């Protein structure tokens, strides 16, 4: 099943700046081959359910390995049964309507 997942991974008790952890997450997602985008407060990733959740698990493993003793992650998951929709399509649809 194709899924689009937005997630915010928050390292706890790991210092003020989280940018090193975000960079580590980006490397994990690049290595996964999944389509993703990092924005200022979260990360969006799309692909087959198992692949997406395996990548998020790997993000946890890597961030723990970088020294974060605790992690809190919030997830938003979207799936469809009528067709496979991509993140870019969803944004394009909104932009078309905005620019009417």
Image: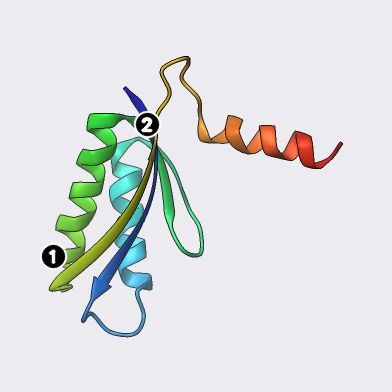
Which residue in the rendered view is the most extreme toward the front?
A: 81
Q: Secondary structure at mark 2?
A: strand
Q: Is residue 58 above or below residue 4?
A: below
Q: Which quadrant is the C terminus positioned in?
A: top right
Question: Which of the two residues, 64 or 83, is positioned nearer the viewer here?
Answer: 83
Q: Secondary structure at mark 1?
A: helix
Is 43 situated left or right of 74 in this image? Answer: right
Residue bearing the label numbered 2:
3
Q: Residue at x 77, y 36 (%)?
A: 97
| Rendered location of residue 4, percent (x, y) | 41, 36
| Rendered location of residue 23, percent (x, y) | 36, 62
Residue bearing the label numbered 1:
65
Q: How is the image coloured?
A: rainbow
Is 79 situated left or right of 98 in this image? Answer: left
Which residue in the rendered view is the most extreme toward the right?
A: 100
Q: Is residue 73 above or below residue 98?
A: below
The span from disc 2 to disc 1 (Cα, nearest Å) is 27 Å
């Amino acid at each position: 099943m194709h899924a689009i997942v937005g997630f915010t991974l928050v390292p706890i008790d790991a210092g003020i700046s989280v940018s090193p952890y975000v960079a580590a997450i980006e490397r994990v997602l690049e290595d996964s081959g999944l389509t993703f985008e990092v924005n200022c407060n979260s990360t969006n990733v799309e692909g087959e359910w198992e692949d997406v959740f395996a990548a998020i698990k790997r993000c946890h493993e890597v961030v723990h390995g970088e020294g974060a003793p605790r992690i809190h992650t919030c997830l938003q998951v979207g799936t469809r049964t009528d067709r496979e929709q991509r993140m870019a399509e969803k944004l394009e649809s909104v932009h078309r309507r905005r620019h009417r």
